[in-house]
Image (spheres, grey):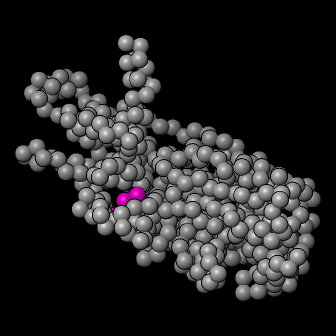
Amino acid sequence: MGHIVYFNVVQAKTIINSPYNLRQDIFADRVVRGKILDKDGEVLAETKVAEDGAEERSYPHENLFAHVVGYSAKGKAGLESVENFNLLTSNAFIVEKVINEFRGEKNIGDNVVTTLDTEIQQAAFDALGDNKGAVVVMEASTGKILAMVSKPAYNPNSVAEDWAALNEDEDSSLLNRATQGKYAPGSTFKIVTALEYIRENSDYDVYAYDCAGEIEYEGTVIHCFDSKVHGNEDLKTAFANSCNASFSEIGLGLDISKYQSTAKDLLFNSELPSPLMYSGSKFVLTPKDNSAEVMMTAMGQGKTQVSPYHMALVTSAIANGGKLMKPYLVDRITNYSGTTVKKNMPEEYAQLMTSREAAQLTEYMTAVVESGTAATLRGQSYTAAGKTGTAEYSMDKEKAHSWFVGFTNVDNPELVISVVLEGAHTTGDIAVGVAKKVFNSYY
């Protein structure tokens, strides 16, 4: 009896939600699966019941929310998986449930009301176009995930029919690139390098470097983009210009053990707070690595790997004064008639950096927009701060991922965004363009 109580109180939800539990849908024999809704109550997933009692799961937006909402055929993914327990639990009025029991009829499962904003999701989906990649949009002050797009997508309405083809798909359409994609961060990682330099050098405001368009050290030559000569720079202008030579030189002077610690503070090589399955990020530089590896890592290449979702978390912490709020996708659980059963509230996850450090990085990221590589965001109805990135992933320098991370309304941050486009361009310009379309749609 003690174990039964423990199971129901502590273990039941985890075990029922587990994709390895082949009996997890036994509740479906007695409950019609509840709906998944966006923040305004728009249906993202629902079960339609025919006159003969046959049930069919329907996704009105088809591929728009494919990866974040997921599917419930051929197993489960996305919110359909992690919220399986709530969707198959009925908190309908007790008298109604008793009557249904006597009649041998199913009760109606609870609804999962998400934090997702359909308009922002659509804007991000459209902005990605035919590119492979991902977009994550969050609220820095709450941790709410407002949009999560991954492309190429699939139609969850036809997963069962398309299963064989999807599993043989060379484009990995089933993969949620937002949380499970692993990419070299490119120059977005200069956020981490700049933070480490600030921590090691109290006089960082007097940093000076004369960029000649490239740097050579112990036989390794690293070029700035298009070998552009940036001339005399301080730390802010080097960041705004995304100067590879400057940041390579900075990397050579860092204490690698402390660099490792700062990366860990920003959740590299650590568990991430995530409502969905994710791939962990890796920072593998060690004091034993040679100068070439140090230089490459400091500018965002090397062996470092990160997901768009993780970079959204780092950016969110910067926008929120160093404090990362626990990210979440479910605003509340209601019964089928709309009565709230459970409400999730914003919750602090961790202090990733001091408020002073966050303010300094915000100043540098604002310069990226005002005078640097994301100038296309300048002069809008909103203010913005961010960091562009270009991550080469083969010896062919034309093959590179385009990155942008940033946030709007700098003095009182609103939208945080992380964008990556696979093999899209040799600069971060195209990712900035995606972010701009999302921001413009919102404002």
Q: Is residue 79 above or below residue 241?
A: above
Is residue 64 rendered magenta in the image? yes
Viewer-proximal residue, 10 or 225?
10
Please state the horizontal and vertical placement of residue 346, each as a whole percent of the image: 55, 40
Q: Looking at the image, which residue is at 55% across and 66% down?
A: 419
Is residue 193 rendered magenta in the image? no
Image quadrant assignment for residue 388: bottom right
Please state the horizontal and vertical placement of residue 251, each as a whole percent of the image: 83, 65
Image quadrant assignment for residue 205: bottom right
Please state the horizontal and vertical placement of residue 269, each as a whole percent of the image: 66, 50
Image quadrant assignment for residue 224: bottom right
Is 400 on the left-hand or right-hand side of 16? Answer: right
Q: Is residue 50 above or below residue 223?
A: above
| Residue 355 visible to an observer of this rendering | no
Q: Main secondary structure of the magenta part?
A: loop
Is 84 on the left-hand or right-hand side of 56? Answer: right
Quadrant position of the N terminus in the picture: top left
Q: Which residues are magenta?
A: 63-67
Is 316 on the left-hand or right-hand side of 291? Answer: left
Q: Number of labelled discs?
A: 0
| Residue 53 visible to an observer of this rendering | yes
Q: Looking at the image, which residue is at 51% across and 57% down?
A: 180
Is 212 on the left-hand or right-hand side of 60? Answer: right
Viewer-proximal residue, 390 or 378?
390
Please state the horizontal and vertical placement of residue 371, each as a whole percent of the image: 73, 76
Viewer-proximal residue, 140 or 287?
287
Question: Going by the picture, which residue comes out furthest to the left?
Answer: 52
Q: Looking at the image, which residue is at 72% across and 87% down?
A: 226
Q: Looking at the image, which residue is at 23% across and 51% down?
A: 57
